[in-house]
Amino acid sequence: MPKPVLAIVGRPNVGKSTIFNRIVGERIAIVEDKPGVTRDRIYSSAEWLNKEFNIIDTGGIEINDEPLMVQMRYQAELAIEEADVICFIVNGREGITSADEEVAQILFRSKKPIVLGVNKMDDPSMHDRLYEFYSLGIGDPKPISGSHGIGLGDLLDEVIKQFPSQTEDVYDEDTIRISIIGRPNVGKSSLTNAILGEERVIVSDIPGTTRDAIDTPFSKDGQDYVVIDTAGMRKKGKVYESTEKYSVLRALRAIERSDVVLMVINGEEGMIEQDKKIAGYAHEAGRAVILVVNKWDVVEKDDKTMLNFEQKLREEFLYLSYAPIIFLSAKTKRRMQHLLPLVNEVSENHNLRVQTHVLNDVIVDAVTMNPAPTDNGGKRLRINYATQVAVAPPTFVLFVNDPELLHFSYRRFLENKIRETFNFKGTPIRIIARKKNE
């Protein structure tokens, strides 16, 4: 199921990015004591009391050439549209400003759950000023200090209370859920229609035509599928055109609900940086991935065009070395007949279980052929036992003498050996090192 979404909203220089970084636990957003310094709209995953959620720092949403208040209004509206809960941050030292009041009115009209955080309340003697913020009409203000981490626990307690309750998946566990992701105008809706064999989704050359992600169940050759069309990654209108990356959140939700992700690339235009970022979300989520090069019918080709394009893809998507590549045309249906069999194959690999004794034989052979290097102190990694603990993605635990000795390069070597032995085409695999007695 998709994670709930928390958006952090507020005027510039109230500490949104500092609070975001505290909650996420990493210094992701740019933090500086100047208004508007957050250059990019940032989002990440976070967890509180075993509740996972996605979190957005809206500070980086910049609407080109617009006055600050207009930009803030857009940020608030985007947060309202995308978030399940909104955390409205104000500056306790400065008190309520007209900008706070305007944003509060926009948020209040949304009917979305809002948690009010009064930041920069480092000194308990300042808490008397909290009463001023009741006039915003949003509820009990929570005194916090983003820079010192004070009060964030109480704030997050209230946030997770407001998250919607998770509903059970409506689809059978044998149903393969396919999400179609990619930047605007690469042919996601056309691909959906080609898979379904009918015009179920609006298709247009105008980027952002599709309004929302659409679930469409269907069956073929006895297999049940659901296509989640994420063409809604971008909407029509000035705000979404100016903040294209913001709408990737919709893709994140679809990715979390899917088994197999079709990453669509425009064969005519080639790749851009955003393609790599979008594909990265599917990889990090542990989903099976297929790289779909669409619009191949309009590409001028010779006998090396496909090979050269594939080599370029492999160079650009190093972390997706396991993902198969298929060249097709959703418009003419050329090579479409190969797509669903490939989906079935990578879905099966995504759920593949390996027998423990066979896995340990592979690990022993790999270590015998190439022993782990020693560290600076002369200690060498010793693998005592290996077992598979999960599927989707396949996840392996190695019980070792010291997890710190498993260097990323040796982890990659072991992964390659596992892939050489078993068919994990299309799926990431994860290797976790634990101390022998854990």
Image (cartoon, rainbow, N blue to C red):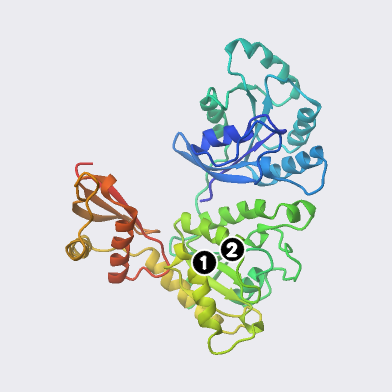
User: Which mark identifies residue 275?
Assistant: 2
Q: Are dots 1 and 2 in contact, CB under 8 Å?
A: yes
Residue at image point 76% right, 33% down: 103
Residue at image point 69% right, 27% down: 90
Q: Is residue 330 above or below residue 92?
A: below
Residue at image point 72% right, 33% down: 11
Query: Residue 179 appears in which quarter of the rendering?
Result: bottom right
Circle 1: element type = helix
Q: Nearer the viewer, mark 1 or mark 2?
A: 1
Instruction: Residue 334 in the image: state x and y as whole percent.
Output: 59, 85
Residue 60 seen in this snapshot: yes
Q: Earlier in the sequence, mark 1 or mark 2?
A: 2
In this view, the residue in front, 341 or 367, is 367
Numbered circles on residues, count:
2
Instruction: Residue 49 in the image: state x and y as whole percent.
Output: 45, 33
Q: Is residue 178 above or below residue 436?
A: below
Query: Residue 139 appears in which quarter of the rendering?
Result: top right
Q: Is residue 309 above or below residue 112?
A: below
Under mark 1, the amino acid is: Glu
Residue 332 seen in this snapshot: no
Under mark 2, the amino acid is: Asp
Q: CA distance from mark 1 to mark 2?
A: 10 Å
| Image quarter (top left, top right, bottom left or bottom right) of the C terminus | top left
In this view, the residue in front, 11 or 255, is 11
Question: Which residue is tagged 1?
Answer: 316
How packed mark 1 is, by other alpha carbons closer than 10 Å (few <14, some 14-19, many 20 or more), is some
